[in-house]
Amino acid sequence: MRRAVFLDRDGVLNRAVVRGGRPYPPDTPEALEVLPGVREALERLRAAGFLNVVVTNQPDVASGKQPRELVEAMHARLGAELAIDAFKVCYHVDADACACRKPKPGMLREAAGELDIDLASSYLVGDRWRDVEAGQAAGCEVFFIDYAYEEKRPEKPYVAVRSLVDAADFIILASIDPL
């Protein structure tokens, strides 16, 4: 089985738009700003033998705030520029009670089945409580980028980091077998 690093999108790969203390996705592909060091971190993770899998909630599609084509254009751009192996997207809102919307682990489990991923040997990097809970429920080790959003806080266990770069350093170091 393979190992993966599951990645939230907004706030992990690209800069989230913060309004009123809460994170939101960028409005256009042109407004999508890849965070410093992300490109190199993903390349290092891939070179260390990890699949890089984006798992992202995009409820603005269901609520009519963004067309699905816009989200797919952003993913096409990220996929062309970054070492990303797969995208899993939940377009639902909480009221839909789907199995894929984080904090449920549906997207991670679906990717694991499709890509032969061992969840217990994999990691999740996120910036919101929903990400942390999804990774925990899937049995992954979780890294939390804490931007101090004005929302519910995640419950431990997780490793607090400042960025994807920091998480990648921990993951790669942990994956090296001692001689």
Image: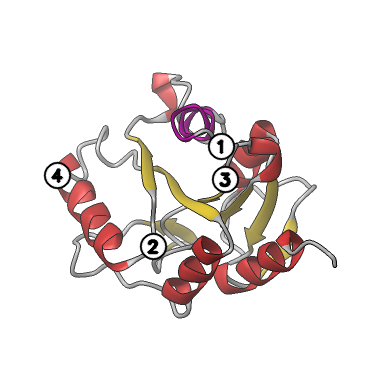
Going from the N terminus, do you reach mark 4 or mark 2 first? 4
Residue type at the position of mark 1: Ile
Q: Residues within 10 Å of mark 3 (few under 14, many from 20)?
A: many
Residue type at the position of mark 3: Asp
Q: CA distance from mark 1 to mark 3?
A: 18 Å
**Which numbered tag is attached to residue 131?**
3
Q: CA distance from mark 2 to mark 1?
A: 17 Å
Expressed as whole percent of the image width and height from the top left, the position of residue 150 reads: 57, 57
Q: Residues within 10 Å of mark 2 (few under 14, many from 20)?
A: many
What residue did someone put label 1 on? 117
Q: Circle 4 — which element? A: helix
Q: CA distance from mark 4 to mark 1?
A: 28 Å
Q: CA distance from mark 3 to mark 2?
A: 21 Å
Going from the N terminus, do you reach mark 3 or mark 4 first? 4
Q: Over which residues does the magenta segment extend?
A: 106-115
**In this view of the protein, which residue sits in the foreground, 130 or 37?**
37
Quadrant in which the N terminus appears = top right
98 relative to 119 in the view: left or right: left
What residue did someone put label 2 on? 83
Going from the N terminus, do you reach mark 2 or mark 1 first? 2
Residue occupying the far front of the picture: 179
77 relative to 43 in the view: left or right: left
Expressed as whole percent of the image width and height from the top left, the position of residue 71 reads: 23, 48
Q: Kindly identify the residue that appears in the image at 37 percent across and 45 percent down.
A: 86
Q: Nearer the viewer, mark 4 or mark 2?
A: 2
Q: Circle 2 — which element? A: loop
What residue did someone put label 4 on? 69
